[in-house]
Amino acid sequence: MKRDLYFSKPIMNTAGSLGFAPDPRSGIDLDSFGAFITNPISLRSRLPAAQPAVIEFPGGFLLHSGLPNLGLSSVLKKHGARWNRADMPIIVNLMADRPEETQQMVRSLENIENVMAVELGFAPLLSDDIILLNLEMCVGELPLIFSLPAEQVLSLGPKLIQDGAAAISVASPRGALPLTSNSSTLTGTSLEKGGGLVTGRLYGRSLFPRSLDLVRSARMIGLPIIGAGGVWTEQDAADMLSAGAMAVETDAQLWVPKEAI
């Protein structure tokens, strides 16, 4: 039986912000969350980027990590029981660049009771045809949320919803910045100046105006949209909900617990 996508509370974390399962030791209050979204998971294990980095820019930062994970089978062995014991539903974020692998992962999650939905994320510049094929091959019991970059939300989103997707979420935008003496690896060591450009996902409060406008535009054409990008305060979340978002994802501000929603 196909499960419905319903949020008892409209706030949740963005994939990649809080790990692979809710952790009561994190110091982050999750009582206001309607769901927990896992870090991105691939079928096979992925190592971190050779030189993971955080590079600040005015109003935010760029994160380059490589999306490391143990692979779905190992993640399930390690965290599956924690998902079922969690006080909130789990949304599993999957790297969906290869439809056959995505289908295999989605089917293996259908038997986990507390998994309420799957969120599918995609590599940059992946074609519309591959994204649509993921939907065709994976539609089934679990609701599918398609995490799309801004430029595809309005162009591809309506077709995905028409063909059976449950919702569209706003993926973190990507960008590139040069390495400088102020750049650092995720372990805190300095990087060599003049090392070229680093690409990665962008986070920070400066993203909010564009994200809010995208949510507004999506609702104007009837898309069930989950807002994300630059959501930093309770008012930011309320503004996205007022603009028509069915739920809101928040990310980098969770790493500063005193400002957590």
Image (tube, rainbow, N blue to C red):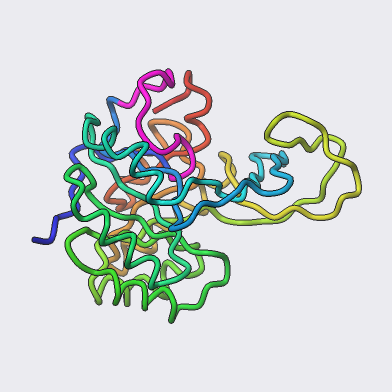
Q: Residue at x 21, y 58 (%)?
A: 142
Residue drawn at point x = 71 percent, y = 39 percent: 56
- The residue furthest right is 194
User: Residue placed at 49% from the left, 47% from the top?
Assistant: 229
Left or right of 59, for residue 211: left
Is residue 26 found inside the magenta-colored segment of the image?
Answer: yes
Q: Is residue 100 magenta?
A: no
Please tell me in which quadrant of the rendered image residue 140 appears: bottom left
For residue 168, above or below residue 237: below
Residue found at the very far left of the displayed protein: 1
Picture coordinates of residue 8, whole percent (x, y): 18, 39
Tell me the chief SS of the magenta region: loop
Q: Nearer the viewer, residue 204 or 62?
A: 62
User: In the displayed structure, would residue 134 be above or below residue 60?
Assistant: below
In this view, the residue in front, 177 or 221, is: 177
Q: Position of residue 109 (x, y in %)?
A: 26, 53
Q: Closer to the camera, 104 or 38?
A: 104
The location of residue 125, given as percent across then percent down, is 57, 71
Q: Residue at x 52, y 24 (%)?
A: 256
From the image, which quarter does the C terminus lie in?
top left
* Residues rendered magenta in the picture: 15-30
The tally of labels here is 0
Horizontal side, residue 127 vs residue 88: left or right = right
Q: Position of residue 178 (x, y in %)?
A: 81, 50
Tell me where residue 20 sits by quadrant: top left
Q: Quadrant of the N terminus?
A: bottom left
